[in-house]
Image (tube, helix red, strand yellow):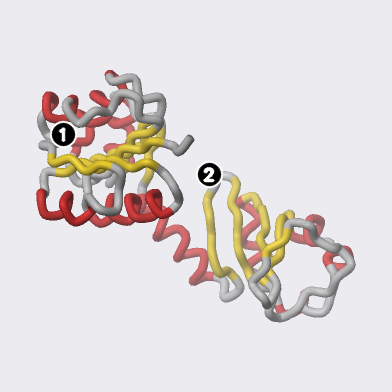
Amino acid sequence: MNKSIAILGMGRFGQFLAEELSKNGADVLIADNDEKIVNQYSGIVSDAVIADLTDTRSIKNIGLSGMDLVIVTMGSSLEASILCVMVAKECGVPRVIAKAASDRMGEILRLVGADEIIYPEKESALQNAHKILSANFLEYFSLDEDLCIINMRPKAEWIGKSLSELRLRNRYGINVVAIREKDGSLSARIDPEKPLTEDAQILVLSETKELKRLKD
């Protein structure tokens, strides 16, 4: 059974979410007060509703009961975000994610019932900062404050050596979880004796505090 997800607010962030979630098989309901955008996405998502997200009655009429997940994406509107979070929880939605523009806004949304807060601008800045600081980092994913996953190229001194030779866990405090070869194939079944190539990409799990050693 496909997961049912409601996206409340169809700014750029909401639009990207709607496209990606629908593409990956979720049953997506969208709601926004902009009739043009709602009509634009009506052929992409499972259901599209024109609604005033600053009005409690209008939010209740969207039909959030029975949803697996509600994502509130109006990061610039605290009032609308609060109402949407509260109504979603009143409707029995088990998980509500809310976008916030600041830490303070995130704290308030948690107080009114949000299960998870996302900060797209902050997370994007964090990812790009780490990529800028290390030429080897291709992608950076924060799991929490202390743990991250990095998709990276092998450092120059690693090329031609095997993982058993490099002893990366001892030297850098990282764990290699998968390797992507030149042909694009990604495998978690890693041969520790196989030399790393220049074209390989390594997916590593690392504590955030160990990143400086990895960049150096």
Residue at the image point whose x is 23% and y is 31% from the top:
84
Q: In the rendered image, which quarter is residue 154 located in?
A: bottom right
Neighbour class for label 1 at 10 Å: few (<14), some, many (≥20)? few
Q: Are marks 2 and 1 in contact (CB under 8 Å)?
A: no
Figure label count: 2
Q: In the rendered image, which quarter is residue 54 located in?
A: top left
Query: What percent of the width, then of the height, locates residue 126?
Result: 45, 58
Observer-nearest of 192 and 76: 192
Q: In the rendered image, which quarter is residue 4 located in?
A: top left
The quadrant of the picture occupied by the C terminus is bottom right
Residue at the image point whose x is 66% and y is 53% from the top:
206
Horizontally, residue 64 falls left or right of residue 36, namely right
Q: Mark 2 sits on what residue?
A: 145
Query: What percent of the width, then of the height, locates residue 187?
Result: 72, 61
Amino acid marked by disc 2: Glu
Report helix, strand or loop for mark 2.
loop
Query: What percent of the width, then of the height, locates residue 104?
Result: 29, 37
Query: What percent of the width, then of the height, locates residue 209?
Result: 62, 52
Distance between mark 2 and mark 1 Cα atoms:
28 Å
Q: Mark 1 sits on what residue?
A: 79
Residue at the image point whose x is 64% and y is 72% from the top:
184
